[in-house]
Image (cartoon, helix red, strand yellow):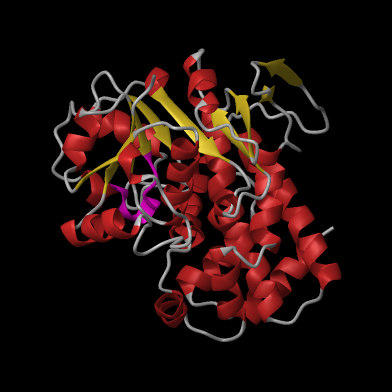
């Protein structure tokens, strides 16, 4: 049986830990402080996130040492917000992940490096692409915690993706598979940017009619970026292959949950941090004030700058993402930005 080590104790990391322990997998879990560990053990829930989720703590080995968690595990599940990845891995040796599988739940680009997590891990920790997998899709932690039916896509090469996915499958969580590691990550990053835009539109008091057009055009813009960056997603086709008793399926179509589905839920859901952040900006909050008020990470904020830099190389047509970048990083008024967006929507 695979032994999972979890780096990240936020709401998403906690929801993923629930899936594993619901399936009776024992896990090693890195928490930053002894106080949080003591509280978790005594109360059987995360003291900071999703407090209503009760864990069987006999299945959890806690540690304040990330290196110890990595050393004692076969699969390292990284569920740290992208803005904090470098800090979380700071001080670890360059070969600490040798012989380990990496499962990334990170929905962002490493700031300052402007690279996906797999590229960062390869550069600084010698992680092979064959040992790197992602778990992404339209799953808000709150709904997974409440056991509302959700779907997650595990991307990776070879049979290990299927084995890893099976560890998370439950009656309330369906697992899917594909091999599009890069495209799935870019889709997860871009949908956060567009969700900030959807929030801005709401804050500016645009209606549902406009929002539907904005999201449809955002989906098209995202697909264009994926194609220009070399990802072979199929638009307008559905291909899946049944596999295993847990009904894992291999999906390659753009309408699948990991692409379009994740975009839709992040733009529409009231659970969406990025939508909430954008809504505050649209209502007149400054970026700094909105960040302080939320007290949570909106991944799309840093992602908008990173994608802007990456797109200087990719050269995709991205007027919507570009306008959101102008508001967040160039001080443009949301009203002005949306005048530009209005002019390009079809």
In-image side of 135 versus 49 (left or right): right
Q: Determine which quarter of the picture holds residue 183.
A: top right
Viewer-proximal residue, 69 or 192? 69
Q: Position of residue 298 (x, y in %)?
A: 48, 63
Q: Quadrant of the C terminus?
A: bottom right
Viewer-proximal residue, 307 or 285? 285
Viewer-proximal residue, 121 or 139? 139
Q: Is residue 326 above or below residue 245?
A: below
The residues colored magenta run 78-85
The reply to whether residue 264 is visible in this rendering is yes
In-image side of 274 versus 343 (left or right): left
Q: Residue at x 67, y 63 (%)?
A: 269
Q: Residue at x 65, y 18 (%)?
A: 245
Q: Quadrant of the N terminus?
A: top left
In-image side of 189 versus 42 (left or right): right
The reply to whether residue 315 is visible in this rendering is no
In-image side of 295 versus 95 (left or right): right
In magenta stretch: residue 97: no
Q: Position of residue 283 (x, y in %)?
A: 61, 85
Q: Position of residue 26 (x, y in %)?
A: 35, 33
Please state the total of marks drawn on the protein image.
Answer: 0
Kindly give the residue lying farthest to the bottom in the view shown: 284
Q: Residue at x 78, y 54 (%)?
A: 216
Q: Is residue 119 above or below residue 33?
A: above
Q: Is residue 239 above or below residue 199?
A: above
Q: Position of residue 72 (x, y in %)?
A: 22, 28
Q: Is residue 125 above or below residue 244?
A: below
Q: Determine which quarter of the picture holds residue 106.
A: top left
């Amino acid at each position: 049986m695979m032994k999972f080590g979890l780096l990240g104790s936020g709401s998403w990391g906690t929801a993923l830990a629930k899936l594993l322990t619901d399936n009776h997998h024992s896990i090693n879990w890195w928490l930053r402080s002894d106080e949080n560990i003591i509280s978790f053990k005594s109360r059987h829930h995360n003291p900071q996130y999703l407090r209503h989720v009760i864990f069987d703590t006999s299945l959890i080995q806690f540690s304040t040492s990330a290196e110890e968690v990595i050393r004692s595990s076969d699969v390292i599940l990284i569920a740290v917000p992208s803005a904090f990845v470098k800090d979380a891995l700071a001080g670890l040796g360059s070969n600490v992940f040798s012989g380990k599988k990496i499962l990334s739940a990170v929905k962002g680009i490493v700031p300052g490096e402007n690279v996906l997590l797999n590229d960062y891990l390869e550069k600084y920790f010698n992680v092979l692409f064959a040992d790197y997998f992602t778990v992404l899709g339209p799953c808000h932690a709150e709904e997974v915690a409440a056991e509302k039916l959700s779907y997650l896509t595990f991307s990776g090469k070879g049979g290990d993706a299927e084995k890893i996915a099976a560890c998370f499958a439950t009656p309330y969580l369906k697992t899917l598979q594909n091999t599009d590691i890069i495209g799935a990550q870019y889709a997860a990053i871009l949908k956060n940017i567009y969700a900030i835009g959807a929030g801005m539109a709401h804050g500016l008091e645009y209606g549902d009619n406009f929002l539907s057009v904005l999201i449809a055009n955002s989906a098209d813009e995202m697909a264009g970026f994926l194609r220009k960056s070399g990802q072979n997603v199929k638009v307008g086709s559905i291909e899946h292959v049944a596999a295993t008793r847990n009904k894992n399926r291999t999906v390659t179509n753009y309408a699948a949950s990991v692409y379009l589905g994740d975009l839709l839920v992040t733009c529409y859901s009231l659970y969406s941090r990025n939508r909430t952040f954008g809504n505050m900006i649209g209502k007149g909050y400054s970026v700094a004030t909105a960040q302080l008020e939320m007290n949570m990470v909106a991944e799309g904020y840093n992602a908008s700058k990173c994608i802007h830099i990456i797109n200087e190389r990719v050269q995709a047509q991205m007027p919507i993402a570009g306008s959101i970048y102008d508001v967040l990083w160039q001080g443009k008024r949301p009203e002005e930005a949306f005048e530009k967006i209005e002019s390009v929507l079809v």
